[in-house]
Amino acid sequence: MNSVVQILEPEGILDGTKTAKFQRQIEQHIESGVNFILVDFSNVTFMDSSGLGALVKALKTMNAAGVKLFLCSINEQIKMLFELTSMDSYFSICENREEFTKHLQQQ
């Protein structure tokens, strides 16, 4: 299977001021026919509940479209946010891009 992968790299603070742009990017990639979207959090310093809400909305949209969402390189603050809200059980979280690549190769 030849999978189409798109990588998103948000930067800085992922909060209510950036969620609309993030949602548009997700929708554009879904419309382009991708199979997987990886959100690389390497350059995100902080995420609040608005950012988490945008991810939950993106996950629902992608599930409906048959697109798989993966996250990688989340920092301790974001990891804690996922754990406190129990959202870590709903998202596929990889340690880094290398782990994501290995996961894809097993498909």
Image: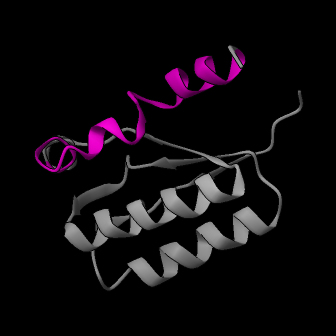
**How many dots with numbers?**
0
From which residue to which does the magenta span run? 81-105
- Residue 62 occupies quadrant: bottom right
Residues 17 and 86: in front is 86
Taking the image as shown, residue 94 lies to the left or right of residue 63, namely left
Q: Residue furthest right?
A: 2
49 relative position to 94: left or right? left
Q: Is residue 20 above or below residue 99?
A: below
Nearer-the-camera pick, 97 or 94: 94
Magenta includes 49?
Answer: no
> Which image quarter is the N terminus in?
top right
Query: What residue is at 38 percent from the left and 27 percent from the top?
Result: 95
Looking at the picture, tell me which residue is in the foreground, 63 or 97: 63
At a point 75% along the width and 45% down the height, the residue shown is 35
Residue at x 59%, y 20% (from the top left corner): 103
**90 within the magenta span:** yes
Question: Percent position (x, y) of residue 99?
Answer: 50, 21
In this view, the residue farthest toward the front is 64
